[in-house]
Amino acid sequence: MNRIFFFLLLLFTSSKTFACQCPPLQPISKELCKNYNVIFYGKVDSVSACAVDGISTVYFTINELYKGAVSPHVKIDFDCASPCLMSFEKGEEWIIYASYPKFDKLTVSLCEHSRKFISNIANDYYFITSQRTFDQEKKFLETEFGVQSFVENNDLNDQQKVLKPHNDQPSPINKLFLLLVSIGVMGVVFLVARKKK
C-alpha cells in the first residue's frame, strides 16, 4: 500500500513540476538572424487574453526595425498556455525575433532569441548565456543590419492587390481560336472512338 501511495505522490508532484525544456540558446549572430523574418526593438502597447487554443497576441510599437517589412505597429502571436508560455506586459521594452509560420501571422517563442529589457543584469537569462547586455545586442543589430524603414500601408495594399487571384478573360480572337481547337479535338476523339468499335 505504501508503494502505491509513494508512486501516486511521485507522479502527481512530477507533473506539477514539469518545466519548459528549451535547447541551449546560442548567442545571436548574423547567421542565426537568418532564422527570423522580422527583428525589431519596440515597446508593448497591449496584450490580449489567452485564447482557448493557448495563443495570445501582443501589440507592439516598433522603435527600431532591423529586419523585415512591417509597419510601425505590429501584432505578434505567442504561446500563453503550455509550460513554454511567454509573458508580456504593457510598457515593457523588447528585442523581438519573430517568424511567419503562416502568411501575415508573426509568432515568437520562449525558446528563441526574443528578450525583454531587465535593468538588473543578474536576473537577465540572455545576458548570462550570451554575455551581451540588452543595449549591446541593440548595437550589434544596428551595426549588422542598420535601422530599416517601415512599410507604408499603401504599399502593402498595392502588393495585396497584385497578389490577389485574377479572373482574366481571353480576347475575342483567342476565344474563337480556343473554340475551334476544342471542336477539332472532339472530332478527332469521336473518329478514333468510332474506328475502335
Image (cartoon, rainbow, N blue to C red):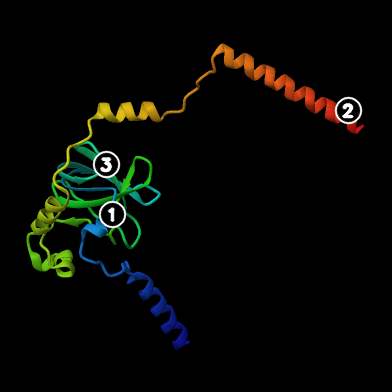
Q: Earlier in the sequence, mark 3 or mark 1?
A: 1
- Residue 35 picture location, percent across and down: 30, 55
- Which numbered tag is attached to residue 34? 1
Question: Counting other residues with Cα less than 10 Å from the Cα at mark 1, is it few (<14), some (14-19), or many (20 or more)?
Answer: few
Q: Quadrant of the C terminus?
A: top right
Name above or below for residue 73 compared with residue 194.
below
Q: Is residue 84 visible?
A: yes
The nearer-to-camera label among 2 and 3 is 2
Q: Is residue 49 visible?
A: no
CA gap between label 2 and label 3 equals 65 Å
SS type, badge 2:
helix
- Which numbered tag is attached to residue 75? 3
Amino acid, disc 3: Lys
SS type, badge 1:
loop
Image position of 149 (left or right of 83): left
Q: Earlier in the sequence, mark 2 or mark 3?
A: 3
Task: Residue under label 2, please give it.
Answer: 194
